[in-house]
Image: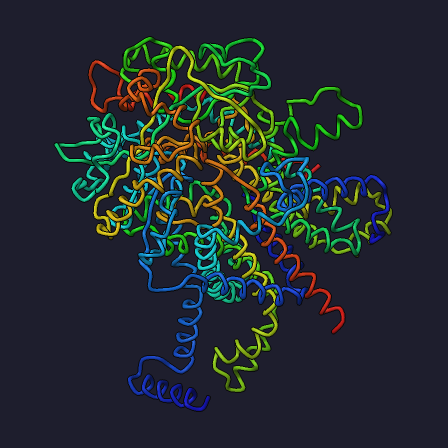
Amino acid sequence: MTRVLAPPLWFAFGFGVVLFMLTPLVLVVVFSFGRNALTSFPMGGFTLDWYRALFANDTFWGAAKNSGIVATAIGLGSTVIGTMAALTLSRLPARYAQVALQVFGFPIMLPALVIGIALMTYFVRLLDVPLGLPTVILGHLVITQPFVILIVHARLSGFDYSLVDSARDLGASPLAAFLTVTLPIVRTTIIGAALIAMAVSLDDFIVTFFSIGNGNTIPTLVWSMVRTTLDPSINASATILITLTVGATLLALWLSRYRG
Amino acid sequence: MTHNDVQQSWNAAMADWLSRRRFLAGLAATGGAAAMTLASRPAAAKTTITWMGWQGYETPIKSGTFLADNDIDFQPTFIASNEEIITKLQAGGVGKTDLITMYFGYLPLMAEGGLLEPIDTSRVTPFGDLVPQFTSQEAVKYEGQQMGIPWNWGSLPIMYDPAVVTAPPASWFDVMKPEYKGKVAMVDDPLGNLLVWGRTVTGAEVGTLLTKEQLAKVIDFMIEVKTKQARAFFATYGDMADAFARNEIVITTIGWEAVAVWTLQKGKQIAYSIPKEGTGMFMDCLCIPKDCPHVDLVYGLINHILSPEPQKQFATEQSAGITNLKAVPLLPDDLRKSYSYGDIDGFMQRARLFPVPPTKEGQYATYDDFLEEYERLKRA
Amino acid sequence: MIPDKTVEVLKDGIAEAIGRRPRRAAFAFRSDLRRWLLPAPAAVVFAGLFVAPVAFFFAMSFWRKKAMRLVPDFTFDNYVETWEKYAGVIAITLGIALATAILTTAIAFAFAYLIRFKAGRLGPALLFITLLTLFGGYLVKIYAWKSILGKDGILNSALLWLGIVREPLTIFIYNPGAVVVTLTYFLLPLAVLPIYGSLRTIDDETIEAARDVGARPRHAFRDIVFPLARPGTLAAFTLSFLVAAGDYVTPRFVGGPYTAMIGDFIEQQFSLRFDWPMGSAMSFSVLAACIPVVLTAAALLSWCGRR
């Protein structure tokens, strides 16, 4: 069953899909180094000017700061809240847990447009809360929490709770039992869930657009630049983000290989 | 529904990928570090000035040392359409926004809705030097008070690729020529389209004051352009500029001088002119929203925007029209000529300043009637 | 730890003294409380920031707009108007969403199958590439697609270079097909994951066993793999379909003059027309129109599985 890509047909198909998925990403990166302001071929030679332009742009830093604040708040808030919920769900009988997971998963299924607009009308018209970064963070909690719950619950659903129970029998408080027994086992999963939540938050445009009021995050800044001119400095910002993700992953892969 | 194991599948997939991989820890550390760097960058203890307007319109604000001298942390919100400013102010923006730039036609509507603060013209030092034809417009005043300060203007010309369209199009109706089939650009700018086509199709004196029948005629014609000639109905002017640079289109049903600047940045020379039917004109104002948090600083900023050097920088960088006549001598020749600062009255004959359609029912189709008809164009 | 126990004993003592709760019940009560406190924040977020806003938004669909003001009311006018004016747009939207969902689910299924059964040790790498496509920014990637599909784009350059065409083709962009391709690209990672998750629950041993008793690969697929993959497949389909039906950004940038989707009109009720009740009625009308499609897909999938 585990022959490596034996039939050529499968190989061709897999190659095609990978090409389909990677080409736009590769183009995003390549154009960030092209001299031409138009993201198209020929690119007119290699340059780092777009990176310089990006770093010199105050508006970009303002947006990056806002994106950073929101993503950090989501990385902490959504992860803690989602993990707490997943801890409980994993102790429920499987049937109830599945129902609960389905319910908690609804926000991923609905179009972001509906969630964004519903939140905006709710904040503005019903609660009379001024829009701003706090409302963006609340909106992102809604759309990222399901990911955290699903991911952490999946890891915990096969978890042997007798370990925790023995720790409790030995006199550990529930928090101590969680910190010393459960957490070390599920730590990598929780970190992974936090990363996915942050990635979703960093890339969200629609919910942010409706819940931010004044100011920009990186996606809304890019959106407004499309209204007038979009230049490859935006590709530069995307490239930095992709590089951070892939670079850190590869580095860690390499480290873990040598340390076993 | 048979969704039973749906989430479990998700879980399993994610968990499989995530749980086995230690390296995610390293990834998280990097991400966290990056977030901290970003969050810690700007210095504290500055006054935050929030502003809404088109991208590019912040040029005069950032020019010179005004922001640094006054320790201002400038927070722009770039808009997608003028209407978006109204929405944002209604949706909690009032009391949190310091300054906006707005198409003059919407000022009466906004003043009536209580979204604007009257402007004390005695605190606007260059007010007497501004183009009188603009400052005297009825729409910039409300109940005798000044609601907006004109600061930037231009026309909505026909734009074309001179490599294909060798002579300036004589008429707007040239877009129907068979050789341009599938190469015509339209832009999703409701009011802009009316400014150009309202008068062109009906011959009405004021292109935005049309009867319902006339309005239907305008939309019918635009539907014909859309279904027979158009390459795309572009979401934005920027997207149209991009399509020019990609050689997707050769002629347009609407324009904005700034588009030529953007396409040139993208390596494509395009041209624009005003056909014989004439066109619409736009004029944008600086307005202070209701409950502006930093009124004194904002007056300083308005004076800075209107002073000659920032005006000149804005005009040259964005190929825009400016309103401070003291700044005009600083402009390069070609800009002075193309905006005919010597004969603004003449310019305003070719490109006319129209009000926004009325809000109240009457002889003419209302603004809402127009938006309703415009949706018919989009659905077609 | 000891103080904790002490408190426990003291509390139990008090409880016994009052004569209300026996030891066990007191303990159960405490741990119950704790059990329900843990998921409480998530429940509050879900109820307060998802259920309540969506419910309020739904209620608003029965309101009226009167001279730039929203008036609470109970009228079905907005729904009537939605179906009168936008039935055609909704039909086009559902068509594009359905094409996208079918294409996405089909590719995702085959790709997930490849990762699970055919790719061997390359599997995790393929999964990683799939997740990678979630990054990079939505709009930036739309512009990347423009440089692939456009008249001067990569696809045309390739066709010209290969001598397949003489003139660059203009049929790749500014039409519904371009919207379907671009949406498929965005939705593919979200569709691969649940299907892969389903396939992962299948033991290699089960399939080996089926082989051993003489089942053909085709039958093993039909009897073992497909039924187990069904929930994930349906999830992938539903997600792709609903998200595609609500999208308005992609059609604005790669769709042509006739590719107006309903999300575009919904968004304009908020950005341009100040008619929130209408926007709400339009949103819920589309969601309602989506339900039969999802139910049909579910029925079709289980019918296929049964044969």
Decide: is C296 above or below B218. below
Task: Tell me where residue B325 appears, x and y as whole percent.
Answer: 29, 32
Q: Quadrant of residue A34?
A: top right
Residue C292 located left or right of residue A118 = right
Q: In this view of the protein, can residue A249 be seen by the observer?
A: yes
Residue B287 located left or right of residue B272 = left
Residue at the image point whose x is 66% and y is 59% from the top: A247
Depth order, front residue of C164/C237:
C164
Q: Quadrant of residue C221?
A: top right
Residue at the image point whose x is 42% and y is 21% from the top: B157
Decide: is A192 above or below B252. below
Residue B75 located left or right of residue A218 = left
Figure disc tally? 0
Task: Tell me where residue B150 appears, x and y as whole percent.
Answer: 27, 33
Decide: is C143 above or below C151. below
Task: Tell me where residue A210 appears, x and y as whole percent.
Answer: 39, 44
Decide: is C99 above or below A13. above
Q: In this view of the protein, can residue C48 be seen by the observer?
A: no
Quarter of the image containing the N terminus of chain B? top right
Depth order, front residue of A11/C209:
A11
Depth order, front residue of A232/A21:
A232
Snapshot colouring = rainbow
Residue A190 located left or right of residue A251 = left
Task: Tell me where residue A163 appears, x and y as whole percent.
Answer: 59, 78
